[in-house]
Image: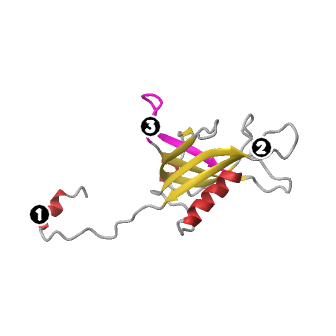
Amino acid sequence: MTTQATDPNALIMGSGARSAVFHNHGDQVWGTIISAEVRQQTDFDSGSPLFWDDGKPRLQVAIILLTEEQVDDDDDGLRAVYAKGQMLKAIRSAVVKVGKRGIEEGGKLVIRYVSDADPKRKGMSGAKQYFAKYEPPTHITELPDSGDAEDDEALPF
């Protein structure tokens, strides 16, 4: 029997989110990054894992965002984004632009469908082109000293 070490928060927060949808130019999703993990791509119809011709798995980054979207009473605002191809390049560019080496939980991310590339084959649609903007999380390193110990009792933790 094999045991897989898994971060419990990745399991709790990494499933059950509605997928972000990019049907039309201008469609976008934005929110706070709750989790991100590398996953193997799967066939849309069968759910079978996808592989490249050389046998290596086709990978993507599954990012869960906490958004302000709510389409019904059961909607918690979580949206899953499956970044691969040009979307991944747009996110990478946004991260590099702010001088970071990757996305972090608590960071803010915007992804917008902006256009279509010229099709590579006749009769096919061109690849969707995306714009992304990333804002790293702000980390509070220490609380300001108020000089009054009684004020500390009002803190939530």
Q: Which residue is mark 2?
A: 126
Label the magenta part by its dominant secondary structure: loop
Front-lying residue, 138 or 105: 138
Cα separation, mark 1 vs mark 2, equals 62 Å
Q: Which residue is mark 1?
A: 150
Could you tell whether 108 is left or right of 57 in the image?
Answer: left
Query: Looking at the image, can residue 63 be seen?
Result: yes
Please tell me whether residue 149 belongs to the stretch shown in magenta: no
| Image location (x, y in percent) of residue 14 | 53, 47
**What amino acid is labelled 3 in the image?**
Asp
Please determine whether, in this image, residue 14 is positioned above or below residue 153: above
| Residue at 63% across, 47% down | 82
What's drawn in magenta, residue-wise? 68-83
Query: Looking at the image, can residue 84 be seen?
Result: no
| Image location (x, y in percent) of residue 35 | 51, 53
Which class describes the residues within 10 Å of circle 1: few (<14), some (14-19), or many (20+)?
few
The label on residue 116 is none
Front-lying residue, 157 or 22: 22
Whichever of labels 2 and 3 marks the residue nearer the N terminus, that label is: 3
Looking at the rendering, which quadrant does residue 18 occupy?
top right
Which class describes the residues within 10 Å of circle 3: few (<14), some (14-19), or many (20+)?
some
